[in-house]
Image: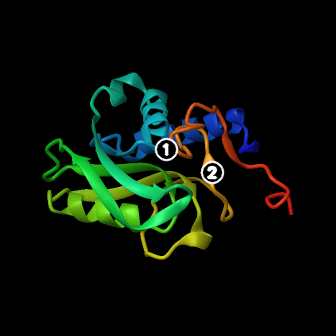
Amino acid sequence: MSVRVLIDAHTVQNRVADMAEQLADDYRTSPPVVVGILNGAVRFMMDLLSGMPSDFSQLVDYDFVGVSTYEGTRPRSQADVRSYTVVDMRDRHVLVVDGIIDTGATLLRVLSLLKAHCPKSLKVCVLLDKPAHRTHEVRIDYTGFAIDDQFAVGYGMDLGQRYRGLPYIGVEDSPRSRG
């Protein structure tokens, strides 16, 4: 697969910095528990936390949920939760971070699991929103970019464990994807 740049690294970094500032402002009186969805959210989540003022980010607890959602480039019909360890969330604000929302099945499954821990609030932050592909209704509170129905890689997102390290968001560059 040849990858074409959809969103360049500079634009991604600027948007993530803006989102980090917004999150720190919104949660300034009560730092949240941040839960990243593995593996695609790791880079985005760490950059969000790094972009927050250090006096704030050091108060943020974070954890991860391992979920398998794709078979190649096709979403599975149901998200398979592989690992799940939890910081105490009772009566605390919880922010779920994911690299991309596609069908919404993954986020719906994770939100259902986390609600059982009685958080004070439960919000969602995604780098990429692909609304054209949504089959499950999920409220997204913070969105980096909305994209068309294309398979995105880079900045932590992969295709068969490849392309995660790209500093930008890319899509397949083929005659089919050019028009």
Residue under the image location 75 percent in, 43 percent down:
2
Q: Is residue 172 left or right of residue 21?
A: right
Residue tagged by mark 2? 152
- Element assignment for label 2: strand
Residue 68: give x, y in percent of width and height.
37, 53
Residue furthest top as drawn: 54
Q: What number is the disc on residue 8?
A: none
Residue under the image location 38 percent in, 61 percent down:
107
Crowd rating for badge 1 (residues with CA inside 10 Å; few <14, some 14–19, many 20+): some
Q: Is residue 50 left or right of residue 155?
A: left
Does residue 44 sit above or below 139 in this rendering? above
Residue 86: give x, y in percent of width and height.
18, 44
Residue 25: give x, y in percent of width and height.
43, 42
Amino acid type, label 1: Gln
- Element assignment for label 1: helix
Residue under the image location 54 percent in, 43 percent down:
158
Find residue 150 and report its image quarter.
bottom right
Q: What number is the disc on residue 22?
A: 1
Crowd rating for badge 2 (residues with CA inside 10 Å; few <14, some 14–19, many 20+): many
Does residue 142 sit above or below 88 in this rendering? below
Circles 1 and 2 in contact, beta carbons < 8 Å: no
Q: State which mark lies toward you, 1 or 2.
A: 2
| C-alpha span from label 1 to label 2 | 25 Å
Amino acid type, label 2: Ala
Residue 47: give x, y in percent of width and height.
49, 32
Q: Is residue 157 left or right of residue 82?
A: right
Residue under the image location 51 percent in, 40 percent down:
161
Mark earlier in primary sequence (1, 2): 1
